Protein backbone atom coordinates (compact mmCIF):
# COMPACT_ATOMS: atom_id res chain seq x y z
CA UNK A 1 0.00 0.00 0.00
CA UNK A 2 1.40 3.43 -0.84
CA UNK A 3 1.91 5.66 2.20
CA UNK A 4 -1.12 7.75 3.05
CA UNK A 5 -0.32 11.33 2.22
CA UNK A 6 -2.27 14.20 3.67
CA UNK A 7 -3.53 16.60 1.02
CA UNK A 8 -1.57 19.84 0.70
CA UNK A 9 -2.88 22.46 3.11
CA UNK A 10 -5.43 24.76 1.51
CA UNK A 11 -4.02 28.24 0.95
CA UNK A 12 -5.26 30.24 3.87
CA UNK A 13 -6.49 33.80 3.87
CA UNK A 14 -4.34 34.41 6.96
CA UNK A 15 -1.20 33.62 4.94
CA UNK A 16 -2.29 36.08 2.27
CA UNK A 17 -3.08 38.76 4.86
CA UNK A 18 0.27 38.29 6.60
CA UNK A 19 2.31 38.22 3.41
CA UNK A 20 0.45 41.19 1.97
CA UNK A 21 0.78 43.48 4.99
CA UNK A 22 4.14 42.54 6.52
CA UNK A 23 6.12 45.35 4.87
CA UNK A 24 3.44 47.91 5.67
CA UNK A 25 3.44 46.84 9.32
CA UNK A 26 7.20 47.16 9.63
CA UNK A 27 7.15 50.60 7.97
CA UNK A 28 4.37 51.96 10.17
CA UNK A 29 5.83 50.50 13.36
CA UNK A 30 9.08 52.33 12.65
CA UNK A 31 7.31 55.64 12.18
CA UNK A 32 5.11 55.47 15.27
CA UNK A 33 6.62 57.50 18.11
CA UNK A 34 5.87 55.18 21.05
CA UNK A 35 9.57 54.49 21.67
CA UNK A 36 10.85 57.90 20.65
CA UNK A 37 12.56 60.15 23.20
CA UNK A 38 10.24 62.91 21.99
CA UNK A 39 7.18 61.10 23.34
CA UNK A 40 5.78 63.12 26.21
CA UNK A 41 2.23 63.39 27.50
CA UNK A 42 1.34 66.12 25.01
CA UNK A 43 2.63 64.10 22.04
CA UNK A 44 0.92 60.94 23.30
CA UNK A 45 -2.36 62.86 23.61
CA UNK A 46 -2.05 64.10 20.02
CA UNK A 47 -1.21 60.58 18.86
CA UNK A 48 -4.24 59.11 20.60
CA UNK A 49 -6.43 61.91 19.22
CA UNK A 50 -5.26 60.95 15.72
CA UNK A 51 -5.93 57.27 16.42
CA UNK A 52 -9.46 58.26 17.48
CA UNK A 53 -10.06 60.16 14.22
CA UNK A 54 -9.31 56.98 12.26
CA UNK A 55 -10.80 54.30 14.50
CA UNK A 56 -14.05 56.19 15.13
CA UNK A 57 -14.62 56.77 11.42
CA UNK A 58 -13.66 53.23 10.40
CA UNK A 59 -15.58 51.49 13.17
CA UNK A 60 -18.60 53.64 12.32
CA UNK A 61 -18.33 52.44 8.71
CA UNK A 62 -18.08 48.82 9.86
CA UNK A 63 -21.00 49.21 12.26
CA UNK A 64 -23.20 50.42 9.39
CA UNK A 65 -21.89 47.89 6.91
CA UNK A 66 -24.02 45.05 5.57
CA UNK A 67 -20.88 42.98 4.98
CA UNK A 68 -19.81 41.97 8.48
CA UNK A 69 -19.91 38.16 8.23
CA UNK A 70 -22.66 36.70 10.39
CA UNK A 71 -21.39 35.35 13.68
CA UNK A 72 -18.85 38.12 14.14
CA UNK A 73 -19.54 40.12 17.31
CA UNK A 74 -18.39 43.54 16.13
CA UNK A 75 -19.87 45.41 19.11
CA UNK A 76 -17.72 43.40 21.53
CA UNK A 77 -14.59 44.28 19.55
CA UNK A 78 -15.01 48.02 19.04
CA UNK A 79 -12.04 50.00 20.28
CA UNK A 80 -13.44 53.53 19.99
CA UNK A 81 -14.97 53.39 23.52
CA UNK A 82 -11.52 52.79 25.02
CA UNK A 83 -10.10 55.69 22.99
CA UNK A 84 -12.92 57.96 24.21
CA UNK A 85 -12.20 56.92 27.79
CA UNK A 86 -8.49 57.66 27.38
CA UNK A 87 -9.03 61.01 25.70
CA UNK A 88 -11.45 62.15 28.40
CA UNK A 89 -8.91 61.08 31.05
CA UNK A 90 -6.32 63.17 29.21
CA UNK A 91 -8.64 66.20 29.13
CA UNK A 92 -9.63 66.03 25.44
CA UNK A 93 -13.22 66.26 24.16
CA UNK A 94 -13.33 63.60 21.41
CA UNK A 95 -16.33 65.21 19.72
CA UNK A 96 -14.21 68.18 18.68
CA UNK A 97 -11.57 66.06 16.93
CA UNK A 98 -11.20 65.69 13.14
CA UNK A 99 -12.22 62.36 11.55
CA UNK A 100 -10.53 60.56 8.70
CA UNK A 101 -12.50 60.74 5.44
CA UNK A 102 -10.27 58.51 3.34
CA UNK A 103 -11.10 55.01 4.56
CA UNK A 104 -10.71 51.51 3.13
CA UNK A 105 -13.64 50.31 1.03
CA UNK A 106 -15.94 47.77 2.67
CA UNK A 107 -18.17 46.42 -0.10
CA UNK A 108 -17.82 42.69 0.46
CA UNK A 109 -17.38 40.26 3.32
CA UNK A 110 -13.82 39.65 2.16
CA UNK A 111 -12.99 43.35 2.40
CA UNK A 112 -14.59 43.55 5.85
CA UNK A 113 -12.41 40.64 6.99
CA UNK A 114 -9.29 42.32 5.66
CA UNK A 115 -10.06 45.49 7.61
CA UNK A 116 -10.93 43.53 10.76
CA UNK A 117 -7.68 41.57 10.50
CA UNK A 118 -5.72 44.82 10.81
CA UNK A 119 -7.82 46.21 13.67
CA UNK A 120 -7.67 42.94 15.60
CA UNK A 121 -3.99 42.32 14.88
CA UNK A 122 -3.14 45.80 16.12
CA UNK A 123 -4.08 44.68 19.64
CA UNK A 124 -1.14 42.24 19.63
CA UNK A 125 1.51 44.93 19.92
CA UNK A 126 -0.56 46.60 22.62
CA UNK A 127 1.09 44.84 25.53
CA UNK A 128 4.53 46.14 24.56
CA UNK A 129 3.13 49.63 24.00
CA UNK A 130 1.15 49.54 27.26
CA UNK A 131 4.34 48.79 29.22
CA UNK A 132 6.16 51.59 27.44
CA UNK A 133 3.53 54.27 28.24
CA UNK A 134 3.20 52.94 31.81
CA UNK A 135 6.95 53.23 32.42
CA UNK A 136 7.60 56.37 30.41
CA UNK A 137 4.43 58.39 31.01
CA UNK A 138 2.93 56.76 34.11
CA UNK A 139 -0.30 55.83 32.29
CA UNK A 140 -2.54 52.86 32.98
CA UNK A 141 -6.07 51.86 32.02
CA UNK A 142 -7.58 54.54 34.26
CA UNK A 143 -5.65 57.59 33.18
CA UNK A 144 -5.08 57.30 29.42
CA UNK A 145 -3.70 53.83 28.63
CA UNK A 146 -6.88 51.75 28.18
CA UNK A 147 -6.79 51.56 24.37
CA UNK A 148 -3.33 50.02 24.26
CA UNK A 149 -4.48 47.10 26.38
CA UNK A 150 -8.06 47.02 25.21
CA UNK A 151 -8.54 43.26 25.65
CA UNK A 152 -6.32 43.04 28.74
CA UNK A 153 -5.20 39.54 29.61
CA UNK A 154 -7.64 38.16 27.00
CA UNK A 155 -5.65 39.54 24.05
CA UNK A 156 -4.24 36.15 23.01
CA UNK A 157 -7.59 34.43 23.39
CA UNK A 158 -9.40 37.09 21.36
CA UNK A 159 -6.79 36.84 18.61
CA UNK A 160 -7.08 33.06 18.50
CA UNK A 161 -10.88 33.30 18.27
CA UNK A 162 -10.57 35.86 15.47
CA UNK A 163 -8.16 33.66 13.51
CA UNK A 164 -10.55 30.74 13.87
CA UNK A 165 -13.46 32.88 12.71
CA UNK A 166 -11.40 34.11 9.76
CA UNK A 167 -10.68 30.53 8.75
CA UNK A 168 -14.35 29.58 9.01
CA UNK A 169 -15.54 32.06 6.37
CA UNK A 170 -15.37 30.42 2.93
CA UNK A 171 -13.31 32.56 0.55
CA UNK A 172 -12.15 31.69 -2.95
CA UNK A 173 -8.93 33.04 -4.46
CA UNK A 174 -10.65 36.29 -5.47
CA UNK A 175 -12.01 36.75 -1.95
CA UNK A 176 -8.60 36.11 -0.41
CA UNK A 177 -7.04 38.65 -2.69
CA UNK A 178 -9.78 41.20 -1.90
CA UNK A 179 -9.23 40.66 1.82
CA UNK A 180 -5.48 41.18 1.49
CA UNK A 181 -5.99 44.34 -0.59
CA UNK A 182 -8.42 45.73 2.01
CA UNK A 183 -5.92 45.00 4.78
CA UNK A 184 -3.17 46.81 2.84
CA UNK A 185 -5.52 49.71 2.22
CA UNK A 186 -6.30 49.87 5.95
CA UNK A 187 -2.59 50.17 6.79
CA UNK A 188 -2.06 52.78 4.06
CA UNK A 189 -5.09 54.88 4.98
CA UNK A 190 -4.08 54.80 8.63
CA UNK A 191 -0.48 55.76 7.94
CA UNK A 192 -1.53 58.59 5.61
CA UNK A 193 -4.02 59.88 8.16
CA UNK A 194 -1.46 59.79 10.99
CA UNK A 195 0.99 61.55 8.70
CA UNK A 196 -1.51 64.32 7.94
CA UNK A 197 -2.10 64.71 11.69
CA UNK A 198 1.69 65.11 12.05
CA UNK A 199 2.11 62.42 14.69
CA UNK A 200 4.57 60.15 12.85
CA UNK A 201 8.37 60.28 13.02
C1 LIG B 1 4.89 50.58 17.51
C2 LIG B 1 3.74 50.01 17.21
C3 LIG B 1 3.54 48.53 17.05
C4 LIG B 1 4.22 47.48 17.59
C5 LIG B 1 5.39 47.52 18.56
C6 LIG B 1 3.61 46.27 17.09
C7 LIG B 1 3.98 45.00 17.44
C8 LIG B 1 3.34 43.86 17.05
C9 LIG B 1 3.61 42.54 17.57
C10 LIG B 1 4.66 42.23 18.66
C11 LIG B 1 2.81 41.68 16.93
C12 LIG B 1 2.71 40.19 17.17
C13 LIG B 1 3.56 39.44 16.26
C14 LIG B 1 3.44 37.97 16.56
O1 LIG B 1 2.94 37.60 17.63
O2 LIG B 1 3.82 37.19 15.69
C15 LIG B 1 2.01 42.44 16.00
C16 LIG B 1 1.09 41.89 15.16
C17 LIG B 1 0.25 42.63 14.36
N1 LIG B 1 0.16 44.00 14.32
FE1 LIG B 1 1.39 45.29 15.24
N2 LIG B 1 2.59 46.60 16.26
C18 LIG B 1 2.50 47.96 16.22
C19 LIG B 1 1.59 48.70 15.53
C20 LIG B 1 0.58 48.18 14.76
C21 LIG B 1 -0.42 48.96 14.09
C22 LIG B 1 -0.54 50.48 14.18
C23 LIG B 1 -1.19 48.10 13.40
C24 LIG B 1 -2.39 48.38 12.54
C25 LIG B 1 -3.20 49.41 12.68
C26 LIG B 1 -0.69 46.77 13.64
C27 LIG B 1 -1.22 45.62 13.10
C28 LIG B 1 -0.79 44.34 13.41
C29 LIG B 1 -1.35 43.15 12.81
C30 LIG B 1 -2.44 43.07 11.78
C31 LIG B 1 -0.71 42.07 13.42
C32 LIG B 1 -1.00 40.60 13.21
C33 LIG B 1 0.06 39.88 12.41
C34 LIG B 1 -0.28 38.39 12.32
O3 LIG B 1 -0.97 38.01 11.40
O4 LIG B 1 0.15 37.65 13.19
N3 LIG B 1 0.39 46.85 14.48
N4 LIG B 1 2.36 43.76 16.11
Image (cartoon, rainbow, N blue to C red):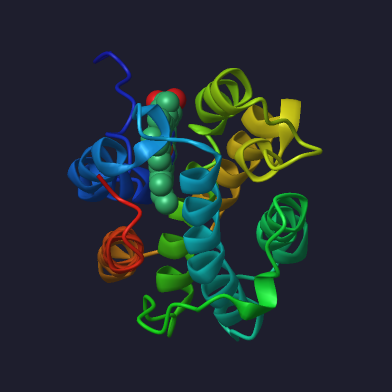
The image quarter in which residue 4 lies = top left
In the image, taking residue 15 as reference, residue 60 lies left or right, namely right
Coordinates of residue 76 in the picture (x, y in percent)? 77, 57
| Identity of the residue furthest to the right in this view | 142
The residue lying toward the viewer, choosing from 54 and 43, is 43
Q: Is residue 170 visible?
A: no
Would you identify the image quadrant in which residue 72 lies? bottom right
Q: Quadrant of residue 188?
A: bottom left
Q: Is residue 141 above or below residue 81?
A: above
Q: Nearer the viewer, residue 79 or 44?
A: 44
Disc tally is 0
Residue at 68% across, 56% down: 87
Horizontal relation, residue 160 to residue 105: left or right: right
Which residue occupies 51% across, 44% down? 44
Q: Is residue 60 above or below residue 19?
A: below
Where residue 134 appears, as percent x and y from the top left, is 63, 23
**Ligand 1: image quarter:** top left
Quadrant, the N terminus: top left
Residue nearest the observer in this picture, 43 or 179: 43
Residue 48, visible in the rendered structure: yes
* Residue 9: % across, % down: 32, 36
- Rendered position, 9 above or below 14: above
Residue 165 at x, y = what percent?
Answer: 59, 50
Q: Specify whether 97 is left or right of 71.
A: left
Q: Is residue 94 above or below residue 143?
A: below
Split into 4 quadrants, where in the image is the C terminus? top left
Amino acid sequence: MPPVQSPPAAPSVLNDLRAGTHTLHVALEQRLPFFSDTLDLGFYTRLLSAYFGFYQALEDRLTHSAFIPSGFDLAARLKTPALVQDLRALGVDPHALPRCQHLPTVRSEAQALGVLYVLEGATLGGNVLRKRVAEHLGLDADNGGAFLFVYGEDTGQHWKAFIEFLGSVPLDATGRSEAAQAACSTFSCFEQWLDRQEVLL
